[in-house]
Image (spheres, rainbow, N blue to C red):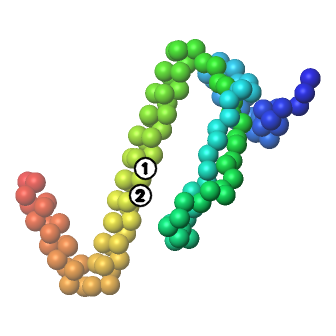
Amino acid sequence: MAYTAYDKMRAEAPRDLKYFESKFEARIEDSREYKQYVRRMPYDMWDGKVPFNVEPQVVPMKAVHLTIDNLERLIREQELIEHLQSDADYGKKLWNMLRADERIRDSNPAVAKAYRNYLTLLELARK
């Protein structure tokens, strides 16, 4: 039996791959297809001419076999991860804004006093 790139990948990250295979009842195998692409030239290095001497890069692909139910579950989990990442990014942005506001209040006594008055007015408006 030949040692394939898939075997090498399994040896390098066996825990994650085995977990994926068991969680989604997946079967992963070498594919007969290859992804071929040409590395884009950085815009600042482009002289306006189309380069014809560019070497394409060929990357072997894998075939992942899943049941329809497991594919749908994988898609739902990916959507959930993207949603959670979006929420985390928003929380990080909000936290940074709060810290920046706090630094401004700490360095400017007039701003700190105005902020305290603002909070007092908010409390009065709630009652």
- For the point 49% across and 34% down, the residue is 78
Q: Is residue 30 above or below residue 81?
A: above
Q: Secondary structure at mark 1?
A: helix
Crowdedness near tag 1: few (<14), some (14–19) or many (≥20) residues, C-alpha within 10 Å: few
- Whether label 2 touches label 1, CB < 8 Å: yes
Query: Front-most of 38 and 70?
Result: 38
Q: Which mark is residue 88?
A: 1
Q: Position of residue 70 (x, y in %)?
A: 55, 19
In the picture, measured across the screen, residue 21 lies left or right of residue 4, that is left
Q: Position of residue 107 (x, y in %)?
A: 32, 84
Disc 2 residue type?
Lys
- For the point 61% across and 50% down, the residue is 38
Q: Position of residue 83 (x, y in %)?
A: 41, 40
Crowdedness near tag 2: few (<14), some (14–19) or many (≥20) residues, C-alpha within 10 Å: few
Q: Is residue 117 above or below residue 54?
A: below
Q: Position of residue 102 (x, y in %)?
A: 33, 73
Q: CA distance from mark 2 to mark 1?
A: 6 Å
Q: Which quadrant is home to the C terminus? A: bottom left
Numbered marks: total: 2
Query: Front-most of 116 and 46?
Result: 46
Q: Which quadrant is home to the N terminus? A: top right
Query: Front-most of 114 and 84?
Result: 84
- Residue 19 visible in image: no
Q: Secondary structure at mark 2?
A: helix
Residue under label 2: 92
Query: Front-most of 102 and 10?
Result: 10
- For the point 40% across and 47% down, the residue is 86
Q: Which mark is residue 4?
A: none
